[in-house]
Image (cartoon, rainbow, N blue to C red):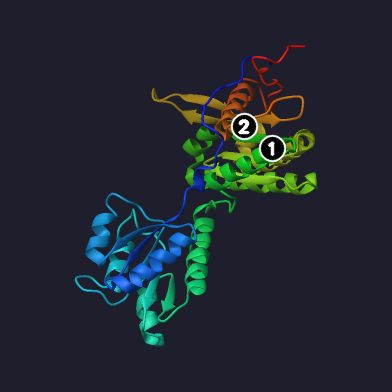
């Protein structure tokens, strides 16, 4: 194919996760709160301060912190009650909380853990311990949020970082966008539980194909539903996709009811009371490539847009299909065209 490259954004391809983490410090003691806030800022965190639990909840209506460092003993609303309130609200239920406390007894820690506290800092504490606990709690929380609960594969944020990291390097890379064709009829006829089996089956097929691809390691991501992503070297694309398509089609056939698998289609009820035939599932895979002498990207969103465009091309073809973008970057204005 040959056409002008998709221009998604004029902004540089920066990782949106590069912004500083916002930490809310909730403590009525200005000396302790100031000490915590100063050291967090020195280590690159953005800090928001509140004097008690109610003020913290009010501030969270307009600002969403990535983590809260909360003192146990405070007026108006203490740290334990604040933590309970945070856990009860859907928008803050997953917010990690580190409790500052002079209480070191096991029974007190049990009370806090029962309320939903993630970690403790027992006073007095030093700067190194503060930064280590904040950093490790944030890391664990991000890793948990970035993993698909269905497949265990990294999600959108981790996929974005992987693409950005590849763009920063000087090596060639390819990004593949995988989608199951006719997945909706499967859900309509068999239900979501069976649909989830197709998704986990694809995850296993993709993983087996990536393992067989060898070095360099292939990155795999699950961005939701039946959509998956892989990032690899361009030389790995064809053997990788061939392996995953063959593996998935054989495994998916076994997920259908025997009579449907044998006749090669399922019957889907329509709105008029009739039935439409839907062929068995296949895969559509769109691939964007960044190569020397080929195409280079300046924005990770352009990579995603090209892979999505190629996936649409693949979907227009019968059966499982891999569409690879082989366009070259447009020459610079002063660069001669050969």
Residue 68 visible in the picture: yes
Dot 1 lies on which element? helix
Q: Position of residue 29 (x, y in %)?
A: 28, 73
Quarter of the image containing the N terminus?
top right
Q: Are marks 2 and 1 in contact (CB under 8 Å)?
A: yes
Disc 2: CA contacts within 10 A as few (<14), some (14-19) or many (>=20)? many
Front position in the image: 2 or 258: 2
Quarter of the image containing the C terminus?
top right
Residue 181 visible in the picture: no
- Residue 143 appears left or right of 214: left
Q: Which residue is mark 1?
A: 249
Residue 88 vs 213, above or below: the answer is below
Which numbered disc, 2 or 1, marks the residue closer to the eye?
1
Q: Quadrant of residue 37?
A: bottom left
Q: Residue furthest bottom?
A: 105
Q: Position of residue 296 (x, y in %)?
A: 67, 28
Front position in the image: 222 or 1: 1
- Residue 215 appears left or right of 290: right
- Residue at 40 percent across and 86 percent down: it is 104
Q: Earlier in the sequence, mark 2 or mark 1?
A: 1
- Residue at 53 percent across and 30 percent down: it is 267
- Residue 280 numbered tag: 2
């Amino acid at each position: 194919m040959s056409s002008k490259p998709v221009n998604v954004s004029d902004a540089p391809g920066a990782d949106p996760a590069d912004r500083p983490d916002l930490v809310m410090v909730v403590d009525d003691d200005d000396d302790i709160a100031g000490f915590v806030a100063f050291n967090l800022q020195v280590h690159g965190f953005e800090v928001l301060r509140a004097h008690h639990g109610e003020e913290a909840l009010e501030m969270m209506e307009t600002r969403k912190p990535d983590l809260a460092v909360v003192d146990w003993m405070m007026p108006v609303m203490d740290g334990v009650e604040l933590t309970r309130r945070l856990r009860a609200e859907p928008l803050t239920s997953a917010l990690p909380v580190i409790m500052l406390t002079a209480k070191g007894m096991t029974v007190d820690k049990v009370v806090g853990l029962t309320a939903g506290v993630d970690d403790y800092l027992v006073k007095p504490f030093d700067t190194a311990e503060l930064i280590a606990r904040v950093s490790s709690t944030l890391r664990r929380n991000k890793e948990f949020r970035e993993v698909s609960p269905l497949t265990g594969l990294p999600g959108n944020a981790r996929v974005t970082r992987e693409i950005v990291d590849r763009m920063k390097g000087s090596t060639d890379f390819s990004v593949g966008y995988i989608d199951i064709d006719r997945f909706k009829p499967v859900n309509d006829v068999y239900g979501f539980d069976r649909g989830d089996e197709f998704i986990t089956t694809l995850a296993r097929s993709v993983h087996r194909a990536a393992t067989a691809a060898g070095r360099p390691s292939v990155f795999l991501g699950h961005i939701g539903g039946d959509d998956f992503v892989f990032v690899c070297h361009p030389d790995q694309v064809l053997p990788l996709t061939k392996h995953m398509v063959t593996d998935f089609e054989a495994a998916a056939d076994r997920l259908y009811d025997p009579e449907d698998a044998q006749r090669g289609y399922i019957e889907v009820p329509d709105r008029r009371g009739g039935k439409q035939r839907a062929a068995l599932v296949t895969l559509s895979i769109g691939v964007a490539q960044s190569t020397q002498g080929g195409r280079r990207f300046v924005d990770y969103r352009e990579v995603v847009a090209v892979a999505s465009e190629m996936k649409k091309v693949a979907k227009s073809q019968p059966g499982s299909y891999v569409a690879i973008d082989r366009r070259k970057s447009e020459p610079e204005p002063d660069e001669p065209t050969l």
